[in-house]
Amino acid sequence: MTFSENLLKLRKQRGLAQTAVAESVGLTVRAYQRYEYGERTPSMEVLIALADLYDISLDELVCRKRK
């Protein structure tokens, strides 16, 4: 699973609109959409805000698995 796919899955699992997520982490809706559509990569600050919003680790957020 890619980061953008995971963002979409997390948002839908919690029944949130893109607008709600964007506002919660201090982004415009369009900026958030670019992350969810895989068009851009968020800064560390945004990654941390998203992980905090979803109450998950950064590794979980970015789909990182140790070998």
Image (cartoon, rainbow, N blue to C red):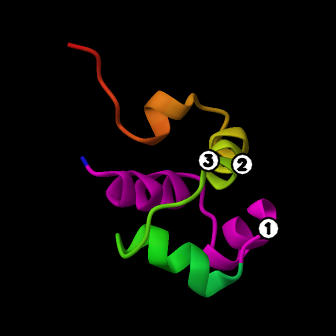
Q: Residue at x 47, y 68 (%)?
A: 35
Label 3 CA crowd tier, 10 Å (few <14, some 14–19, many 20+): few
- Residue 54 colored magenta? no
Identify the magenta region: 2-27
Viewer-nearest of labels 2 and 3? 3
User: Where does label 2 land, which residue?
Assistant: 49
User: Where does label 3 land, which residue?
Assistant: 44
Q: In the rendering, at what x and y percent does residue 7 appear?
A: 46, 56
Task: Give the quarter of the image for residue 16.
Answer: bottom right
Q: Main secondary structure of the magenta part?
A: helix
* Dots 1, 2 in contact, CB < 8 A: yes
Q: Residue at x 63, y 41 (%)?
A: 51
Q: Secondary structure at mark 2?
A: helix
Q: In the rendering, at what x and y percent does residue 2 appear?
A: 28, 51
Residue type for callout 2: Ala
Looking at marks 2 and 3 on the same chain, the residue that comes earlier in the sequence is marked by 3
Viewer-nearest of labels 3 and 1? 3
Task: Give the quarter of the image for residue 41.
Answer: bottom left
Residue type for callout 3: Met
Q: In the rendering, at what x and y percent does residue 32 appear?
A: 58, 73
